[in-house]
Image (cartoon, rainbow, N blue to C red):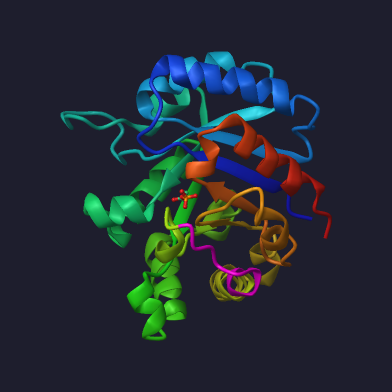
Amino acid sequence: MRKTIIAGNWKMYKTISEAIELVNALKRELFKLDGDDIDIVLCPPFTALSNVFETLAESNMQLGAQDVFWEEEGAFTGEVSCRMLKDAGCKFVIIGHSERRQYFGETNESVNKKVKAVLKEGLVPIMCVGETIGERERGLTFEVLENHLKGGLKDISAQEAENLVIAYEPVWAIGTGKTATPDQAQEAHKYIRRTLATMYGSELASSIRIQYGGSVKAENISGIMQQEDVDGALVGGASLKTESFAAIVKKASEVIK
Ligand code: 13P
């Protein structure tokens, strides 16, 4: 049994006061859910991490960051280390989001360094993989997934991989309102799990959680979550409002496979 994990990636939205307001409203909506049954993770921008951590104290929600730098410390202007994120209350770190690959020069090599650093610090990496529309149309989806997985997880042992979360985020579904169909999501997730099995064996692969991300809403979460290899969601736009994120979390928690 893989524990469902729903994470909200707030991207570059929310000032500190807006973030606190959203967390307080989510606490009121979601307090009945048991954190032993579902992981609910909020990933605000760096500036709001500490305040969000304080606000979600003793709730069933946990904190994540949207990126990290792999060095422990040093003259790296503008960067934030794993230890700093842990100090701010983070348990999870999103790594290799397609927006970082697209706009900030993230590569499989930098993703790999970040995943290693995050694991070393005892945090959980949420490593993002996924194809563009052009790649899908050229029939390269599986090739891209394999490349992202093998590149991002290079030299990471089975023991370390136990703590991984993978997010399948087809780039064409991010912020576009176009969601992968449940079948498309399952096909990609199954391929990801099969690739993980070739790297780490089927027992470990069957324990690694794989989230779907890309225009997830309350209206489509149930169908996606019902798929065998879908273990949760990484939610962008719909995580910015209490009603939509709370509805997604509740619907996801109701899906029993
Ligand atoms: P949207 O849910 O806005 O499509 O974003 C998905 C995403 O990028 C989550 O990381």
In the picture shown, does residue 54 fall above or below 101?
above
User: Can residue 175 be seen from the camera position used here?
Assistant: yes
In the rendered structure, the answer to whether residue 208 lies left or right of residue 77 reads right
Q: Which residues are magenta?
A: 177-185
In the rendered structure, the answer to whether residue 82 lies left or right of residue 178 reads left
In the picture shown, does residue 137 fall above or below 149?
below
Q: Quadrant of the C terminus?
A: bottom right
Q: Quadrant of the N terminus?
A: bottom right
Residue projecting furthest to the right: 256
Residue at 20%, 28% (x, y): give it.
74
Residue at 69%, 65% (x, y): give it.
206
Horizontal and vertical percent for residue 154?
40, 63
Please identify the quarter of the rendering in which residue 188 is found: bottom right
Residue at 60%, 76% (x, y): give it.
187
Q: Is residue 178 magenta?
A: yes
Horizontal and vertical percent for residue 228?
73, 67
- Residues 47 and 134: in front is 134
Horizontal and vertical percent for residue 237?
48, 43
- Residues 110 and 191: in front is 191
Q: Is residue 247 magenta?
A: no
- Residues 123 and 181: in front is 181
Q: How many marks?
A: 0
